[in-house]
Structures are given as C-alpha cells and as structure tokens.
Image (cartoon, rainbow, N blue to C red):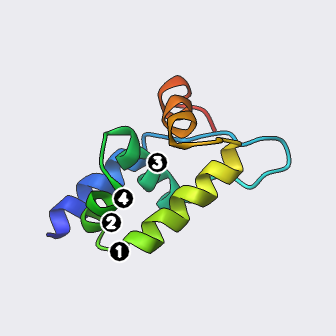
Amino acid sequence: PRSDRAKAGSRASAVMFATETGQKPLTKREREVLNLISEGFSNKQGALRMAISPRTFESHRAEAMRKLGARNTADLVRTALLHPGAG
C-alpha cells in the first residue's frame, strides 16, 4: 500500500531533531522510524508500514538513538515528544 508509506513519510517530515554538537542530523528515514516508534509501532509493524525489513528498521532506530544520545527506546520517544519541531 503506497498510500501508507506516503502517509508515514508526510508525518515523519513533521518531526525534526537537532543532534548533539558535531553530530550529523537525522536522515529522512531515521525521522520516519522515530515518528513511527513514537506512535507506538513495534519494529515489525514499522518495518511493514515502511516496506523495509525489520532489521533495516532496527538499524535506522539504532542510528537515530546514537545521534540523539538516547540510551534506550524510551529516551528516543521522550526526545520525539519534547522536541517535535527542533532541527
């Protein structure tokens, strides 16, 4: 379903983040993954929504966590909720 991917992509663009000093900004895919996680999707559900493998979804999540200095998924979601327009 292309429309699902299009919707997910448009939502992801609403979530931008400033990373720690010297870090690269999140990619579009990392923002999309972060947005889906913050909406409560599991890795498998998010991967299906984005039409990528669960492992690729997990890789995007891990890289976003590294860039944002999040220790766990809860930190990642907290960042998404506290800084929805930054970056």
Which element carries disc 1, helix, strand or loop? Answer: loop
- Residue 11 point in image, percent of width and height: 34, 45
What distance separates the C-alpha of mark 2 from that of mark 3?
A: 12 Å
Q: Label 2 is placed on what type of residue? A: Ala
- For the C terminus, which image quadrant? top right
Residue 47's label in the rendered image is 2
Which element carries disc 4, helix, strand or loop? Answer: helix
What distance separates the C-alpha of mark 3 from that of mark 4?
A: 11 Å
Residue denoted by label 3: 34
**Dot 4 crowding, Cα within 10 Å, few <14, some 14–19, many 20+:** some
Residues under numbered marks 1 and 2 in contact, where contact means CB atoms less than 8 Å apart: yes
In terms of image quadrants, where is residue 44?
bottom left
Residue 52's label in the rendered image is 1
Work out whether residue 34 or residue 13 is closer to the camera in this orientation and state it. 34
At x 35%, y 48%, the residue is 36
At x 33%, y 50%, the residue is 10
As drawn, the residue found furthest toward the top would be 82
- Residue 50 point in image, percent of width and height: 31, 66
Which element carries disc 2, helix, strand or loop? Answer: helix
Residue 43's label in the rendered image is 4
Q: Label 1 is placed on what type of residue? A: Ile
What distance separates the C-alpha of mark 4 from that of mark 2?
A: 6 Å
> Which comes before the other along the chain, label 2 or label 3?
3
